[in-house]
Amino acid sequence: MRESHIRRKTGETDITLTLNLDGTGKHDIQTGVGFFDHMLTGFARHGSFDLTVTCSGDTWVDDHHSVEDIGIALGDAVAQALGEKRGVRRYASLYLPMDEALILCAVDLSGRGGYYDALDIPAQKIGRFDTELVYEFMNAFAVHAGLTLHLRRVCGRNSHHIVEGAFKALGRALREAAAIDPEGRDEIPSTKGML
């Protein structure tokens, strides 16, 4: 099983996170940020990842530190669980519809972390959640996971649908990219011999 356990404690957050890439979508997520819990639940369920997250953060300041630090911890967990990435498919992309919203997500387990987005979320807030934190989470996650991540809003008006579509698309694309390729089970999918 490709599993990882991360503990991240700073002056702003205290995070415990476990991840099983070969899970069934079981999740227990308690970040202190309700909308973000909803997004991580969609990520875990649609990625078929077993994910537990607990975070005690300084949400009396705002949600920024909790959301970004969970991105760091989840990225570290993915990198740890993938190890040297032997046998993975490496690449995946898909279009995910969420009602009127359509999201393109592409992932490369390149070892070079980078997040490139064009989500253009219309609202500044969804409930009390600052939508600019989607970028902060995705960027921290991609950099720490060592993967290239592209997210694009093809169409969509409802900010909730756009963001939820992005998290679900990320889960599904990551599941496919991290899947073991039966034809290359013992190979690292790179001409360099490493990722």
Image (cartoon, rainbow, N blue to C red):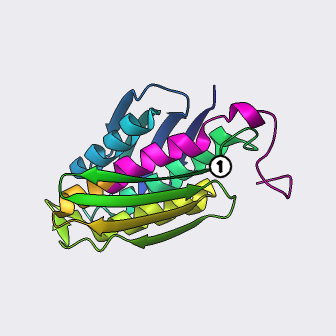
Relative depth, front residue between 56 and 184: 184
Q: Residues within 10 Å of mark 1 (few under 14, many from 20)?
A: many
Residue at image coords 51%, 40%: 175
Above-or-below relation of 51 to 140: above
Residue at image coords 22%, 48%: 34
Residue interval drawn in magenta:
166-195
Q: x%, y% of residue 28?
A: 35, 31
Above-or-below relation of 91 to 133: above
User: Does the magenta-highlighted stretch encompass residue 135?
Assistant: no
> Mark 1 is on which residue type?
Arg
Residue at image coords 38%, 45%: 55
Relative depth, front residue between 138 and 57: 138
Numbered label tally = 1
Above-or-below relation of 31 to 12: above
Q: Is residue 62 left or right of residue 149?
A: left
Q: x%, y% of residue 159?
A: 19, 64
Q: Which residue is mark 1?
A: 90
Q: Quadrant of the N terminus?
A: top right
Callout 1: helix, strand or loop? loop
Relative depth, front residue between 10 and 111: 111
Quadrant of res 178: top right
Q: Is residue 120 left or right of residue 137?
A: left
User: Does the magenta-highlighted stretch encompass residue 184?
Assistant: yes
Q: Is residue 76 left or right of residue 59?
A: right
